[in-house]
Image (spheres, grey):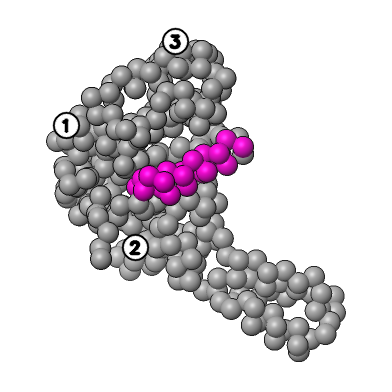
Amino acid sequence: MTRDIVVRARGVAMSYGAKRVLDSIDLDIHRGEVIALLGANGAGKTTTIEILEGVRSPTAGTVEVLGIDPVRAGVEHRARVGVVLQSWRDHGRWRVREFLHHFFVLHSPFRKHDSWAVDDLLERVGLADKARARIMSLSGGQRRRLDVAVGLMGNPELLFLDEPTAGFDPHARREFHELMHELVDARATTILLTTHDLAEAERLADRILILHNGRIAANGSADALAREVAGTTEVRWTARGERFVHSTESATRFVRDLLARDPDVDDLEVRRTTLEDTYLTMVAQHEAADAETNGERA
Ligand SMILES: Nc1ncnc2c1ncn2[C@@H]1O[C@H](COP(=O)(O)OP(=O)(O)OP(=O)(O)O)[C@@H](O)[C@H]1O
């Protein structure tokens, strides 16, 4: 059975003046999926999220979010979608709890039985002890936790998170990941996030999208993408003072054979390909292909 599609984009293009940022994006996101949107600075990740949120109209193409064109969506639709943008800037004089309470009131016409209470949410994002602090006194990471709390406020069924953990310390990052897992497991929340932290993408996402040159250059689980770029595991060892490296898809079999045939193997190390390795290889492959095409055109 096909799972519900909550986001559908077809042929989405976006230009700022003469600058084309998105060329032709086709995308389906299913209910309960966690998707990480990756790409270099300026690749168009924020632009994509803003189009899906409905704060930007694409230059071409169609978008449906929860069955509706987000640009035309009303408040009821917006209450079903949580958004964490790249930070609120102008509420510095508000106190943390007062600010969240403001959003609590805004959400009240659409509140669901399992919506977060303000104090629970403050506790969950690790800001309970800052409830009375003014927003301007928060550190960057604490500020970001507040952004996340605002995004979660109405217990949305779909969450757009634009670099949610930028500035988080390792502890806050770990707690954020746990919270995301909880949202997906207990509430089947669908999540689209952008991040430059590839370990985070690997930990959270069911599916990785890589934006490159205005298109989705890769689309699949971290494992599936790793399989697309040569061996998925690297085996390193030394023997008789020499260092060896071998890439393989079946490390166990390779190591068993290696140990059987060479008694001098030492310092054996097996390292799975990380999403960072895969990402860098894929982007390099696309850049080489682009350079070849441009060379042919010149
Ligand atoms: N309002 C705007 N007007 C003109 N150009 C814009 C505007 N917003 C974004 N751009 C340009 O569009 C391109 C894509 O920007 P976008 O913010 O979507 O990238 P990104 O992938 O989110 O980057 P980053 O990883 O740095 O956050 C960039 O070259 C940026 O300069």
x, y percent for residue 45: 36, 45
Could you tell me the amino acid type at mark 2? Asn
From the viewer's perspective, is 152 left or right of 120?
left
Front residue of 205/50: it is 205
Q: Answer yes or no: is residue 87 visible.
A: no
x, y percent for residue 92: 45, 14
Find disc 1 in the rendering and name its residue.
Answer: 74
> Quadrant location of residue 261?
bottom right
For the residues labelled 1 and 2, say whether their Cβ atoms are less than 8 Å apart. no
Residue in view at x 45 percent, y 71 percent: 228
Q: Measure how far apart labels 3 and 1 are at the Cα level.
A: 29 Å
Q: Is residue 175 magenta?
A: yes
Residue in view at x 25 percent, y 66 percent: 1
Earlier in the chain: of badge 3 and badge 1, it is 1
From the viewer's perspective, is 227 left or right of 154?
right
Q: How would you rate the neighbour count of disc 1 (Cα within 10 Å): few for under 14, some for 14-19, many for 20 or more?
A: few
Find disc 2 in the rendering and name its residue.
Answer: 294
Could you tell me the amino acid type at mark 1? Gly
Where are the magenta residues, as a range? 171-190
x, y percent for residue 220: 39, 63
For the residues labelled 3 and 1, say whether their Cβ atoms are less than 8 Å apart. no
Earlier in the chain: of badge 2 and badge 3, it is 3
